[in-house]
Amino acid sequence: MPNYSFTKYKTEKSKMKYSMKYEINLVSTQKIKKERINNLPEIINCVYIARDLTNEPANILTPNTYPKIIKDIIKANRLSIKYSELSASQLKKNGLNLIYNVGLKNNKSEAKLMILEYKGTSNKEPHILLGKGVTYDTGGLNLKDTYQSLNEGKADMAGSATIISFLLGYSKLKGKENIVVVVPLVENNIDSFTIKPGNVIKSYNGLTVEVTDTDSEGRLILADSLSYITDKYPKSPIIEFSTLTGQEEELSCKQFSVIMGTNNDKIKKRLIELGNYLNEELVEIPLLDKFEDKIKSDIADVKNYSSSCSADMIIAGMFLKKFITKNTNWTHIDIGGTAYYMNEINKLNSSESSGIGVRLLFDFFSL
C-alpha cells in the first residue's frame, strides 16, 4: 500500500481535492493475477477516498456538505450511480423518527438518509450496504468523557465512508452485482432541543424506543435504516459497517473488527476468510437471545442501552435485531476500534483514518 497523508489543510502543501486518480507503484514478490493488478490502483484510490472523507474536520464535512461531495465525485467521474435522499422533513413524514430526532439542532433537524444505487449485469436482488454517518459525535447530553473520544468524534462516519468509497470504485470498474448503499446522516450535537435521556421515540417499524443513552445514537439511526431497508428491499442481504461501540476497541486493542448477524452464515464465513487474507481480521461475537431482557424498557417497547450489562456490543446487536424481520439476512461489522489511529498496529496506515473495509468489500464482491 502506498504512503498516504492528509495534507489538505497544510498551507505549504498544494490544495487537495477529492480525486479518483493517484500514482501507484506496485512491488510484490507474490504471483498476482493480471486482472487483480489492473484493478489494484482503483481499489487503493477508494481506500484513499474513504480516508480523505473520514479525516475531514467536522466543520467541513456535515450532513449538508457530505451529499454534495459525493454527488460531485459521481458527476466528475461519470459514474453510473443513481443518487437520492430523504430530507429531514421527509424522514419525519415517513416515520423515520429515530434518525430525525438524533439530528435535531436549534429545533430543526439536519438529518438525511442518503441512498446510492448501482445496477450491474446481475439479475439477482441487490445487496444492501448500510453505513453509519454521524459526521460528529459529542455523545449528546451523555457527553463523552475523554479528550480522545471528542477529538475522534469526526470519525463516527467512517462506516459510511467505507461503503460509499467502495461503491464509487465498483461502479467505475463496472462490477456485475446490483448494490444499494444506504447512509443515515446526522450530527450528534448538544443544545436545548437535542434528545434527552429518558425520551421515548416511535421508530419506523412502530416500536417505541426509550433513549437511555444519547451516546448510543448510532444504533438509533441504524435501527430506522434497517427497518426502512427491510421494508423496501425485503429479500436483499444487508451488510452494515459502523463505528458502533467504544467497547470494540477495548476488546480488540485495534487488532480486529467484530462481526455478528442473523441468517448470514455463508456471508459471514466468506467475510472472515477474506479478512484473514487481507489483514483486516474479523472476529465473531454471538447474538444470544438471553440478552434480550437487557434491552426491555419499563416505559417503552425497547431501550437503546443497558446500564446493568457491560457487554455493550451484544446489547447493540440485540437492539438492532429488533428492527429487522425474522428472515432478514443481516451482517453487522463493528469498526469502532479499527477505523482510526491504526498506524501503530499496521505501519501501512496513516495516523488517522485507516479506510478499513474497502478492500474487504472489493474482494467480497468480486468483479
Image (cartoon, rainbow, N blue to C red):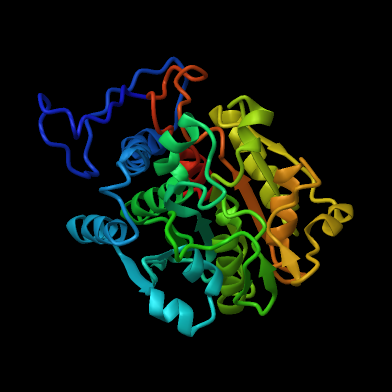
Asked if one can make out residue 355 in the rendered structure from this viewpoint, the answer is no
Is 285 displayed left or right of 215 in the figure? right
Is 13 displayed left or right of 171 in the figure? left
For image coordinates 52% across by 58% down, the residue present is 130
Of the pair 41 and 142, the residue shown nearer to us = 142
For image coordinates 56% across by 39% down, the residue present is 336
Of the pair 340 and 45, the residue shown nearer to us = 340
Residue 180 drawn above or below residue 158 = below
Percent x, y of residue 188: 46, 54
Percent x, y of residue 190: 44, 54
Of the pair 82 and 59, the residue shown nearer to us = 59
Residue 123 drawn above or below residue 51 = below
Which residue in the rendered view is the most extreme toward the front?
A: 192
- Quadrant for residue 295, please give it: bottom right
For image coordinates 24% across by 44% down, the residue present is 20
- Quadrant for residue 66, please give it: bottom left
- Quadrant for residue 106, please give it: bottom left
* Quarter of the figure that contains the N terminus: top left
Q: How many marks?
A: 0
For image coordinates 62% across by 67% down, the residue present is 199
Percent x, y of residue 162: 44, 46
Which residue in the rendered view is the most extreme toward the bottom?
A: 93
Is 17 displayed left or right of 296 in the figure? left
Percent x, y of residue 310: 76, 40
Asked if one can make out residue 227 in the rendered structure from this viewpoint, the answer is yes
Residue 23 drawn above or below residue 87 = above
